[in-house]
Amino acid sequence: MKIIIANWKAKITTEADAVALARGSDKEGLVVCPPHAFLDEVRAAIVHASLGAQDYAPDLSARGATHVIIGHSDRRREGETDDVIAEKIALAVSDGLIPILCVGETKPERDAGETHEVLKRQIRTALSRIPAETAPIFIGYEPVWAISTTPGAEPENPTDAARKIAFIREQVSHGSYRAMVSYIYGGSVTATTAGGFLEKENIQGLLVGGASLHEKEITNIWQQAQKA
Ligand code: PGA
């Protein structure tokens, strides 16, 4: 069984839609990440799924969240630095939350051959302020050029994603960081493409954006993750 993280981003805009989608996504092994404004309603609507937030905030654990996405490319694009991300990871861990750190290169960085350098810097800095024994933590490889909302998004292929994740794992184990880390992939994953990623041994789950907004689609992806 592999984990599925549903990142609704800002696409769900009414309480009724948030509650309906939460009910339709209420599966064990699925982490639902609604917009901050709907955390309470979604918390009340789910029994089996876990509640995640899309960014760190001091009230998350009080509102019942167990997971938090940190360093998503939408935030990095708005100017969030690696240092701010490191600070948020440390705050999340001290609040007892499970951080889901997103890392990934942009298209210009990829085209300039800087992917490894970027991933190395993002990981080393993000993990620099938490104790080595912190557990658990997720690291999501999300190439920015493969995310559905990036103009001209191109799909990443599972073999290359697994290679990048192998590199990320190496960075984590070369550092002083020894915690239990799970590695996941995100970027334009759909019910059709999920299987290719899930069959890779070192991809332990998926971060799903656009496809998580459709009950049938997210259910299908979750079912595939159960068998993986
Ligand atoms: P996507 O989003 O699946 O729509 O590409 C993934 C993400 O931004 O986390």
Image (cartoon, rainbow, N blue to C red):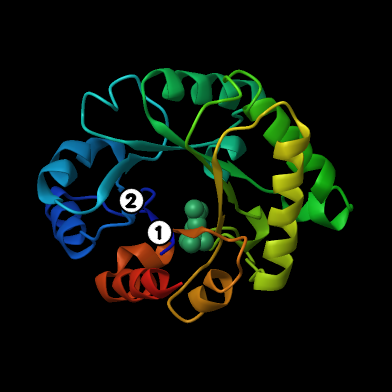
Tell me how far mark 1 sits from mark 2, CA to CA: 6 Å
- Within 8 Å: ligand 1 and the Cβ of disc 2? no
State whether residue 147 is above or below residue 109: below
Left or right: 46 as drawn, with respect to 166: left
Residue 115 position in % (x across, y down): 80, 50
Report the disc number at residue 4.
1
State whether residue 199 is above or below residue 70: below
Left or right: 156 as drawn, with respect to 21: right
Three-letter amino acid code of the residue under disc 2: Val
* Residue closer to the observer: 3 or 153: 3
Circle 1 residues within 10 Å: few <14, some 14–19, many ≥20: many
Q: Is residue 157 visible?
A: no
Upstream in the sequence, badge 1 or badge 2? Answer: 1
Residue 65 position in % (x across, y down): 28, 35
Q: Residue at x 17, y 42 (%)?
A: 43
Three-letter amino acid code of the residue under disc 1: Ile
Left or right: 135 as drawn, with respect to 151: left
Q: Residue at x 75, y 61 (%)?
A: 163
Q: Residue at x 45, y 23 (%)?
A: 93
State whether residue 40 is above or below residue 186: above
State whether residue 130 is above or below residue 163: above
Report the disc number at residue 31.
2
Mark 1: secondary structure: strand
Residue 119 position in % (x across, y down): 74, 43
Q: Quadrant of the N terminus?
A: bottom left
Q: Residue at x 78, y 35 (%)?
A: 174
The extreme right residue here reads 113
Circle 2 residues within 10 Å: few <14, some 14–19, many ≥20: many
Q: Are marks 1 and 2 in contact (CB under 8 Å)?
A: yes
